[in-house]
Structure formats: structure tokens, C-alpha cells
Image (cartoon, rainbow, N blue to C red):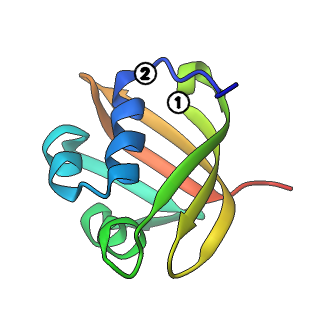
Amino acid sequence: MAPSINDPAVEKFIATVNAGDKDAFFADVPTEDATMSDDGSERDLSAWTEKEIFSPEANGRMEVVDASDDGRSLVVDYTNDAWGTMRTRWVFSVTGGRVSRFETGQAPS
């Protein structure tokens, strides 16, 4: 049984990533001033998502393994063509129905 994600903004985040749909992602998912971090380091959201998710070399995909906080805290098997599959954690902040911040990084063992 798939973990329950009750936040539509997080559901849309996952759906657009898995579809490889960068245009839909930026049209519908983040707020205009959204921020993010990767392994505790602040990153530029546009540059990071291009490199790690949407470029043809990345082709990122998310398979949710565990969800808490109504789906705003996730453990994900994240796969991209550059790095393979990694167990990662994702924590989302949502404002006005859009993702205003996400933090990702290696999931604890």
C-alpha cells in the first residue's frame, strides 16, 4: 500500500517530477519566491531542479516509501540517470496551496 499524501501541493510536486514536466512544475508547484536546500546547503531552485530532475541527463523520479505530517515529510527512493537510486528525505513547506520551500538530502540509515 502506498503511503498517504494528503497535501495537493506535494502530490503535484511528485506528479510533475515523475512526468518530467518542467513547464507544469514551474507553472503550478512552487511559489514565486520558493527556496530549497540539498543536504543542508541552500541551492538555487531553478538550477538545482534542472540539473537533478528535469535535464535529459537527470530524468528524476520519486517513489515514496514513507510519509508523515500529511505527506509533507517524506522518505523517497529518488532515482535519476546521473546518480542512480538513493534513499532521500524530503520536507515541504506549503503556502497558499504551493510549495514555498523544500529540503532534501540523504535519508538516515
Q: Residue at x 59, y 47 (%)?
A: 63
Q: Number of numbered discs present?
A: 2
- Gap between marks 2 and 1 measured at Cα: 7 Å
Q: Is residue 41 above or below residue 76?
A: below
Label drawn at residue 105: none
> Which amino acid, mark 1?
Arg
Label 2 neighbour load within 10 Å: few <14, some 14-19, many 20+: some
| Residue 60, position as x, y percentages in the image | 44, 64
Q: Earlier in the sequence, mark 2 or mark 1?
A: 2
Residue 59 x %, y %: 40, 69
- Mark drawn on residue 72: 1
Q: Nearer the viewer, residue 8 or 105?
A: 8
Q: Amino acid at mark 2?
A: Asp
Q: Is residue 46 above or below residue 56?
A: above
SS assignment at label 2: loop
From the image, which quarter does the N terminus lie in? top right
Q: Quadrant of the C terminus?
A: bottom right
Marks 2 & 1, CB-CB < 8 Å contact: yes
Label 1 crowd (10 A; few <14 / some 14-19 / many >=20): many
Task: Where is residue 54? Give x, y as percent.
Answer: 31, 67
74 shown above or below 23: above
Query: Is residue 4 placed above or below 73 in the rendered structure?
Result: above
Q: Which residue is mark 2?
A: 7
- The residue closer to the viewer here, 7 or 96, is 7
